Image (cartoon, rainbow, N blue to C red):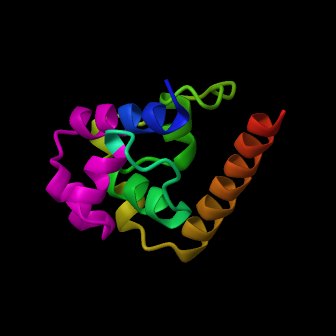
């Protein structure tokens, strides 16, 4: 399974676990339901960093949560995935620093994945 498919399967699993529709996640993230659906189906081979971050925020998870769920990153010691009861916390904080930090983490993860592909 490609990394795009792994990411998409993880997104769908996380979205459905929270009882959210494509439409709700598309609206909350500002990406639109069709884009979220295409990412979930693995049709978007390289989703944009900002789009992934916004979708994660709409789900109330971090980018690291998504990568761990997708099997693209090992879980760090003591890692506990967020439950559905934590839905929306990240999206409602309005913390610009948090968004900036998550975007930096995502960029680092993408660089690391790109290096793995080159090898």
Which region shows up in magenta? 11-39
Whether residue 81 is visible here, answered yes or no, is no
Relative to 52, say whether 96 is above or below: below
Residue 45: within the magenta?
no
- Residue 2 in view: yes
Residue shown at 57% from the left, 42% from the top: 64
62 lies above or below 96: above
Residue 62 position (above or below residue 76): below
The residue positioned 32% from the left and 65% from the top of the image is 29
Residue 112 falls in which quadrant of the image? top right
x and y, in percent, of residue 12 in the image: 30, 37
Coordinates of residue 66 in the picture (x, y in percent) = 49, 39
Point out the image quarter for the C terminus: top right
Left-right relation of 56 to 116: left
The picture quadrant where one finds residue 25 is bottom left
Q: Quadrant of residue 102?
A: bottom right
Classified by dominant secondary structure, the portion drawn in magenta counts as helix
| Picture layout, residue 80 above or below residue 22 | above
- Classify residue 82 as left or right of residue 77: left
Q: Could you say where residue 103 lies in the image, as x and y percent from the top left?
A: 61, 63
**Viewer-proximal residue among 118 and 70:** 118
Please identify the residue farthest to the right as the structure is shown.
119
Q: Image check: 81 left or right of 60?
A: right
Residue 76, position as x, y percentages in the image: 68, 29
């Amino acid at each position: 399974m490609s990394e795009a498919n792994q990411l998409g399967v993880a997104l769908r699993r996380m979205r459905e676990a929270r009882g959210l529709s494509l439409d709700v996640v598309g609206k909350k993230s500002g990406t639109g339901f069709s884009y979220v659906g295409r990412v979930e189906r693995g049709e978007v081979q390289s989703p944009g960093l900002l789009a992934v971050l916004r979708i994660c925020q709409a789900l109330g998870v971090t980018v690291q949560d998504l990568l761990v769920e997708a099997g693209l990153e090992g879980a760090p010691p003591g890692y506990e995935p967020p439950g559905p009861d934590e839905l929306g916390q990240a999206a409602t904080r309005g913390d610009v620093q948090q968004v900036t930090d998550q975007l930096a983490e995502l960029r680092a993860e993408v660089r690391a994945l790109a290096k793995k592909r080159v090898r």
